[in-house]
Image (cartoon, rainbow, N blue to C red):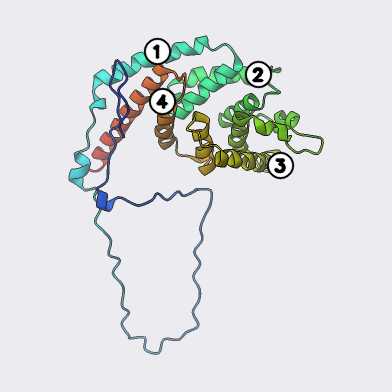
Amino acid sequence: MDFSILAPYPFRFTKIFLPQEKRPSSLAIYNSNFYHTTRCKASNEVTKDSSQAVTRRSAKFQASIWTYDYIQSLSSEYKEVMYKEQRLMLREKVKMMFKKMESEIDQLEFIDVLQRLGVAYQFTNEIRNILDNIYNTQTSKLKNNLYATSLKFRLLRQHGYNISTDVFACFQDKRGNFEKCHSLDVEGMLELYESSFHSFEEEIILDEAINFTTKYLKEYDLNDNRDTYISHLINHALELPLHWRVPRWESQWFINVYERKQNMNQVLLQFAKMDFNIVQSIYQEELKQASR
């Protein structure tokens, strides 16, 4: 999958394609939280002739295309030192952006984008300092903002902070149901949906949030035919929530979507592409070493 060329550096993904005739028709997704148990059923039948030969069927396994020669042929130009130096320069530019983030919502959105692009690991100290400050701040001007509250809740829960679900109480009516007026806030509904999958046991309010947001997001996804940034995120989230996805695969998908977003950060996009390609080249070299 090739990315467009962005000045001053060309970027592309060095994707490994399988032969057309052996390429799988679909991808199977397995959730590690669920276990499938296979039980053996006892048979009451008595074999009359125990000496009778048992005919075993041939499994007819197809030979793997991942031969030694094929693996050793994997190569990427991004293992060169020059690309690592370019990534370091871009990293410093992104690092300077943290100092320009003054408002709480800007900081939260910036951290979220870094995580989705797969480069948050490059700024662990900066992210921790911001989240520490937000968590220790008693008052927030955004407490009545569904989008900001949900984003804050998700990021803090994801990073191990003990934040209570009481932050969502102001969005419920007297009966404990989420008020329907919030369904008009599409970004807020999507963020509440993603946040609800970070629940602990017996957190009923988050169980209700899943049902509430899923209903309206499905309606929005069904009726909205526009090719917009938020539409892609909603459709993607309904397939599988962000919390359940494989980070590196998610990063590759999000880079493509983020590239088409209006007012996206060009430097951040360049850095994410460069980092992805370099990490991919490392994986290829490790695979080659492990197969020897």
Q: Mark 2 points at which residue?
A: 136
Residue 259 tag number: 4
Looking at the rendered image, the disc whose residue lies closer to the viewer, 4 or 1, is: 4
**Amino acid type of the residue that numbered disc 2 sits on in the rendered structure:** Asn
**CA separation in Å, label 2 and label 1:** 28 Å
**Amino acid type of the residue that numbered disc 4 sits on in the rendered structure:** Glu
Residue at image point 67% right, 39% down? 209
Q: In which quarter of the image is the C terminus?
A: top left
Q: Name the residue under label 1.
A: 92
Residue 204 tag number: 3
Residue 214 rendering spot, x and y as whole percentages = 62, 42
Q: Which of marks 4 and 2 is nearer the N terminus?
A: 2
Looking at the rendered image, the disc whose residue lies closer to the viewer, 4 or 2, is: 4
Residue 168 rendering spot, x and y as whole percentages = 71, 31
Name the side, left or right, on which 83 lies relative to 220.
left
Q: Earlier in the sequence, mark 4 or mark 3?
A: 3
